[in-house]
Amino acid sequence: MRSFDLAPLYRATVGFDQIADMMDRVFANDVSQPSYPPYNIEKTDENAYRISIAVAGFTADDLGVEVKENALIVTARKAEDDASRTYLHRGIATRAFERRFHLADHVRVTGASHADGMLHIELEREIPEALKPRRIAIASAESTARAKDVVDAETVN
């Protein structure tokens, strides 16, 4: 597999650090990335999302959800099992994990719940007023000319 050096992007651009960082992360991920635990990402509304992670065998106390620097970090640490148990087959994986999700700008975590072996994390995109589209009224040439005449008449008087 080829290795890409994105250093020229950092030298030649200003303000595009996030794009270059994202490309670094994408190129750094290789195929052997762990798939445990399985998860779903679903869009629940126009600006709302839900990440559902299968966490069978973990209690809510074993799980941690943290947001740090536009990254959602989900961790699980299972307390040591009782040594008196003898398993004939152990198919439920309760090994510790850390799963990271990069959050886009203006996306915040609104809540998390644990039910039926699933951890659900609710996300919402909040677009600031300055970034929302707004309609600009278009004035006709006649109304603009009338407005200028009124202003000029008031300054004369």
Image (tube, rainbow, N blue to C red):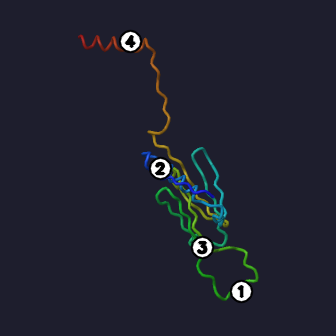
Mark found first going from the N terminus, 4 or 2: 2
Q: CA–CA distance between discs 2 and 3?
A: 38 Å
**In the image, residue 76 lies at what x, y percent?**
58, 70
Mark found first going from the N terminus, 1 or 2: 2
What residue type is disc 3 on? Ala
Q: Residue 87 falls in which quadrant of the image?
A: bottom right
Q: Do the residues labelled 2 and 3 touch (CB within 8 Å)?
A: no
| Residue wearing tag 2 | 8
* Residue occupying the point 44% across, 39% down: 130
Numbered tag placed on residue 86 in the rendering = 1
What residue type is disc 1 on? Thr
* Residue occupying the point 27% across, 13% down: 154
Q: CA–CA distance between discs 4 and 3?
A: 72 Å
Numbered tag placed on residue 143 in the rendering = none
Mark found first going from the N terminus, 1 or 3: 1
Check disc 2 and report its element: helix, strand or loop.
helix
Q: Residue 82 falls in which quadrant of the image?
A: bottom right
Check disc 4 and report its element: helix, strand or loop.
helix
Q: How crowded is mark 2: few (under 14 residues within 10 Å), some or many (20 or more)?
A: few
Mark found first going from the N terminus, 1 or 4: 1
Numbered tag placed on residue 96 in the rendering = 3
Q: CA–CA distance between discs 1 and 3?
A: 20 Å
Q: Name the side, left or right, on which 46 lies relative to 133.
A: right
